């Protein structure tokens, strides 16, 4: 098992949560992952899960964002697989323009030796907070969330269609803002993840006129990767 050692207070029994997390880390280390960004997602799951495991013995609320990054990375990997398995990714990728690559690439290294991609706050973190506020305060998204996402476009009422198309416009604009903010960063992993988040939002927006249930995975990937970066910013501040 290739994991870091958790420090415990003198005389304190090992915390079972830390042991469980270390086992999960070891199980998630891929021997080979061909896609660069999927590799980065696995690496960040490993890095932040390890950091959370190390923090458990002396846990404080300031360590909570470590959990957030870990959960968001794990969910994003699962949801990307779901989007592929359910056909949404292949069906909708043809509707959007390919994304431009980041200005530089993170070099390859041993996934078992993964490090958090944001050990110090990035200058774009303040923009990420502002973007998060925009998500929470958007009237278009508030109306969209209130509509059951189990209803396909073929069964929408005229009012529901208007709500979804307004949300699609918001998702497109928000994707542009995510990408623009990320490209102001010098962090290649942040750029990669943010551009991926933006592309999934664009695919979801493009799917909206003919929305089917499998398309919900696209929005979920974009949301989880956005959350991953937001939590990483707050982890770095602590």
Image: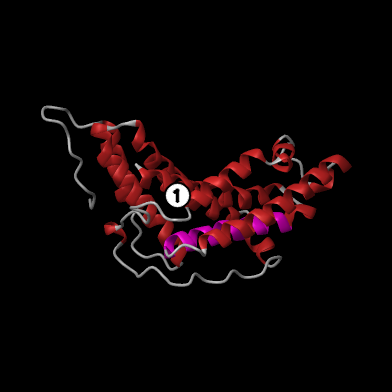
Q: Is residue 196 magenta?
A: yes
* Residue 238 vs residue 3, the one in the foreground: 238
Q: Position of residue 134 (x, y in %)?
A: 62, 44
SS under mark 1 = helix
Q: Is residue 82 magenta?
A: no
Which quarter of the figure is the C terminus placed in?
Answer: top left
Q: Residue furthest left?
A: 10
The structure residue drawn at horizontal position 33% and vertical position 53%, both measured from the top left corner, is: 119
Q: Position of residue 172 (x, y in %)?
A: 69, 56
Q: Quadrant of residue 149?
A: top right
Q: Is residue 63 above or below residue 177?
A: above
Q: Is residue 113 visible?
A: yes
Q: Position of residue 226 (x, y in %)?
A: 53, 50
Magenta residues (range): 187-206
The structure residue drawn at horizontal position 56% and vertical position 56%, both measured from the top left corner, is: 197
Q: Is residue 165 left or right of residue 130?
A: right
* Residue 166 vs residue 16, the one in the foreground: 166
* Residue 38 vs residue 103, the one in the foreground: 103
User: Mark 1 = which residue?
Assistant: 73
Q: Is residue 141 left or right of residue 79?
A: right
The colour scheme applied to this rendered structure is secondary structure
Q: Quadrant of residue 162?
A: top right
């Amino acid at each position: 098992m290739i994991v870091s050692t958790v420090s415990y207070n003198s005389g304190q029994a090992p915390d079972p949560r830390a042991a469980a997390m270390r086992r999960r880390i070891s199980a998630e280390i891929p021997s080979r992952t061909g896609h660069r960004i999927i590799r980065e997602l696995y690496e960040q799951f490993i890095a932040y899960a390890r950091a959370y495991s190390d923090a458990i013995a002396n846990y404080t609320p300031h360590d909570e964002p470590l959990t957030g990054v870990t959960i968001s990375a794990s969910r994003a990997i699962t949801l990307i697989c779901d989007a592929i398995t359910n056909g949404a990714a292949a069906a909708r990728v043809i509707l959007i323009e390919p994304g431009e690559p980041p200005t530089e690439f993170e070099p390859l290294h041993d996934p078992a030796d993964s490090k958090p991609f944001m050990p110090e706050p990035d200058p774009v973190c303040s923009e990420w907070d502002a973007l998060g506020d925009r998500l929470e305060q958007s009237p278009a998204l508030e109306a969209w969330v209130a509509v059951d996402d189990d209803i396909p476009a073929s069964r929408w009422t005229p009012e529901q269609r208007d709500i979804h198309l307004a949300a699609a416009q918001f998702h497109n604009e928000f994707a542009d803002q995510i990408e623009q903010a990320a490209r102001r960063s010098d962090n290649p992993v942040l750029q990669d993840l943010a551009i991926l988040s933006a592309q999934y939002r664009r695919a979801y927006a493009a799917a909206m006129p003919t929305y089917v249930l499998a398309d919900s995975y696209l929005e979920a990937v974009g949301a989880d990767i956005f959350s991953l970066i937001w939590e990483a910013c707050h982890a770095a501040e602590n």
